[in-house]
Amino acid sequence: MRIAVYPGSFDPITNGHLDIIERAAGVFDEVIVGVLNNKKKQPMFSVAERVNMINLTTAHLKNVRTASFDGLLVDFAKQNDAGVIIKGLRTVNDFEYEFQMALLNKTLSSECETMFMMTNSKYSYISSSMVKELAEYKGNLEGIVPYQIIQYIKDKYELQRL
Ligand code: PNS
């Protein structure tokens, strides 16, 4: 059984992330979306909210599940019997950091392979930080985040404005 983890902050999940998840689900027997519970970063959405949003948007993918993790990614992969880490690349700007991370993770765990998938060109400009800025200024999120979570995001920002 080929298991892959697809890690990230997913604050929140975007159409670019979903596209990678769907394509990875076609290649691997199981894909585990790993939501980082990063205590150093102050995310907009709680881990539970981020996991919930991913579950809402990946319900149609039967071999995908979501879990949160803290600590090292290679340990999370090992705990889940995943031999592959999936990363999406949008632009050359992503490359340098991802290259470093892949080499570091390979040093930490030689049996874990990092595999890169190029983003769908339709989504190469999308980032979670851009989504948050759009939501803050009440911009249109259609086509940028999965439709199932648009209202979820709007509600979160409405509550914040109160
Ligand atoms: O969506 P992001 O924030 O770019 O995802 C970054 C992520 C979660 C993939 C990365 O920060 C990570 O792997 N964090 C876990 C800690 C870890 O293993 N770091 C590498 C060794 S120091």
Image (cartoon, rainbow, N blue to C red):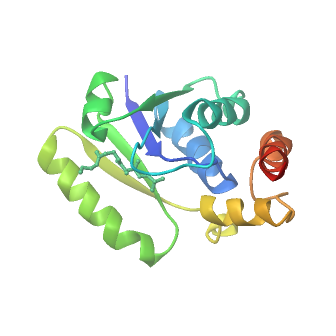
Res 5 quadrant in image: top left
Apparent side of residue 104 relative to residue 126 in the rendered image (left or right): left
**Residue 142, percent across and down?**
85, 57
**Residue 7, percent across and down?**
44, 43
Q: Is residue 79 above or below residue 15?
A: above
Which quadrant is the N terminus positioned in? top left
Q: How many marks?
A: 0
**Residue 135, percent across and down?**
78, 59
Q: Nearer the viewer, residue 109 or 122?
A: 109
Apparent side of residue 62 relative to residue 72 in the rendered image (left or right): right
Q: Nearer the viewer, residue 38 or 72?
A: 38
Residue 45 in view, yes or no: yes
| Residue occupying image coordinates x 63% and y 56% | 16
| Residue occupying image coordinates x 37% and y 29% | 2
Apparent side of residue 105 relative to residue 91 in the rendered image (left or right): left
Residue found at the far front of this picture: 162
Q: Nearer the viewer, residue 38 or 97?
A: 38
Res 129 quadrant in image: bottom right
Res 84 quadrant in image: top left
| Residue occupying image coordinates x 12% and y 49% | 107
**Residue 152, percent across and down?**
80, 40
| Residue occupying image coordinates x 82% and y 53% | 161
Residue 120 in view, yes or no: no
